[in-house]
Each structure stands twice: as structure tokens, then as C-alpha cells.
Amino acid sequence: MLKQSFGKTLISALPSRSSPSTVKNVAGKTRKVQTKSSPLTSRFKTSMRTSGRINGLQWSRKYSDMPNKQWDSRPQGAEDLISKMRSGPQTPPQEERGPFKKGFVGGVGWGAFLLFCAVGGSVWWWGRKRRMEIESSRQKVTATGDAKIGGLWSLVDHEGRPVTSAEYQGKYLLMYFGFTYCPDICPAELHKMATALNNLSPEAQDLIVPMMVSVDPWRDSVAQLAGYVTEFHPRMIGLVGTPQQVDHMTRAFRVYTSKGPEESEGDYLMDHSIFMYLMDKDGKFMDYYGVAMEAEEITESIQNHLIARHDIAQPGPIGALRYWWNHQKDSKK
């Protein structure tokens, strides 16, 4: 057949690996020499023999029933075979492996898609948790906003300046009732108050005024308070007054106080409630913190209250955007 015969002709035209040939020397005598072929020629001849047997059979079956068809005398695939032989063996492309193997929509691997879902789900869950905490804080403020705790008062601060509750309008008050001769409870609670304040952001700290109200007006003088409260926080204010003024304030804030029996040297202890009160900008009760509360818990509670009242922004870019939007709405009212 034509294709097979072409292959045999092409193979026979190539020199063999060791084909004899005759040459004449100067004396006119002839001798035989061996002509060695290149590896490319040998490989081409082997491939052509195999290709001639297989492709020639297919070619004869395909075109045996087409006697009138005109075709090229060169067998089909010869050019491709010669091109492959010249270019050498081709290295197959390495397939990508790993979790980020391409195979999803837009060339994104399954691993990247799952990672995106995990990160997105975590952000959504965190945002939902924060919204629930803020909503719970709002409900708590609404439920306890009418508590009969707080009122008008007039005392003297640790600098000897008379102050009233009206001077602190527009500020949140974090108040503690104690006395400077307290051996252990009051120092621990005031230290907790200072730590909770320091954990807040600078914007939140500017809105909070820490206070200690003395329940021992007989011994806590102005000078005594000045040297006591500044040991815990530089912004803490000490308040004291006459026994009547102190009694009026403790009753308004529902603080229990009781003077203990005096000893031989005139020393005594004061029994009192151990609470911190958080009052809003209008002097109304917001929340309270007992001995079991840690400083971190107090910080988180204060922060949630300020976020719920749109006084500070929630952490993160979304919280900052909401804070800006709420202030824009308030400014238009």
C-alpha cells in the first residue's frame, strides 16, 4: 500500500547503523568502509517501521473503498512524526497539587474557597455576638433605668472645693463609697476601679469620672482624702462632707453604713456596702459592680454601655461607620 510503501522507501533511503559502501583510493583500488548513522536516523527508522505497520493498515482500511479519491502521496502523520523526532521527548506538564489546586469557578481552588467561608463565618459570628451583647446592655439599662438610686447632692472634693451633682452633668460617674482607714476591702476595690479605667480607650476615659465618697466624715479630712485617692488614679476625686451631708448622700444611693464600736485609742471600723455605681450623664443609675466582678468585666460592661448610647464607636471599621452615621442622624434632629 502507498503509505506503507512510502515508509519502506523512506527507511531504505536512510543509511543503516552499519551500512557498507565502496570508495576508491589514490591507486585506483576499491575498498569497503562502514558508514555509521546517527542516533536520530536509527530512531527514525525504528519509528517508521512501527508506524508503517500500524498506520499503513489503518490507512488501507480507510481508503480501500475510495478508488477515485485523489490524495497526497505522502502518508498522513509523517510531518508530525518527523517534527516530534527532531524536537526530542516532551516532558508532560506537572499537575498542580495541594489545597489551592485550580479547579473551581474563576480559577479559585477549593481550599481558598473553604478558607474564605471560614473567615467570613467567623466575622459574621463575632459581629452577631457583639450585637447581642449590646442589645442585652440596652435592655438592662431600660429595665433598671427607673431605679431609685441617686439624686442631688452637695459635698467638698479633696482639693477643698465645694461641688454639687450639677457640676458633673454630661459625664459618667463611677462611684465607690468607702473610707481612708479601711484596712483591705477599700484599697482592693479602688485598685480594681483604676485598672478598669485604664483598660478603656482614651475616648471612653474622658467620659468617665472616678469618685470615692467617704462614709467616715469624722476622720476623713480634705487633706487625708487628697493623699489617699491620688495613690490609685490621678483623675480620681475624693468627696467628703458633714455627717448630715454624707448621711443624705448614702441614703440617696441606697448605701448601708454603720459605725463600729470605738476601741481604747478611739479607733473604729466602718461597716458599709461594697458596690461601685455607674451613673449616666443625667445622674441616673445605669449599673453596679460588686466584689465578685473583675476589672476586665467592669471594663467590658462600661464599654458596652457607652457603645449602646452612641458615645463611643464599636471596635472595627464597621463600628466606626455606624458611630459616624448615628452622629449624622443626631445632628439633623
Image (cartoon, rainbow, N blue to C red):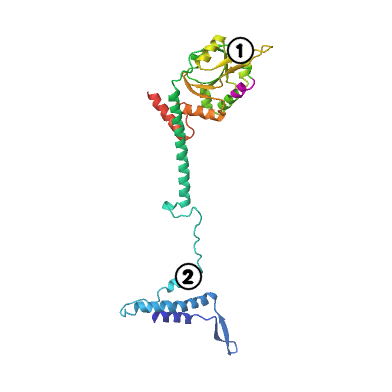
Span colored in magenta:
183-189
Q: Position of residue 251 (x, y in %)?
A: 51, 14
- Out of 175 and 331, give the one closest to the viewer: 175
Is most of the magenta stretch helix, strand or loop?
Answer: helix
In the image, residue 185 lies in the stretch drawn in magenta: yes
Residue 246 x, y percent position in the rendering: 55, 12
In the rendered view, does 63 fall on the left or right side of 33? left
Disc ID at residue 67: none
For the point 44% across and 79% down, the residue is 53
Q: Which tag, 1 or 2, sits closer to the chain's start?
A: 2
Query: Mark number for residue 222?
Result: 1
- Residue carrying label 2: 84
Inspect the image, locate mark 2, and give the three-letter code of the amino acid beneath it. Lys
Point out the image quarter for the C terminus. top left
Callout 1 environment at 10 Å: few (<14), some (14 to 19), or many (20+)?
Answer: many
Residue 47 visible here: yes
Is residue 203 shown in magenta?
no
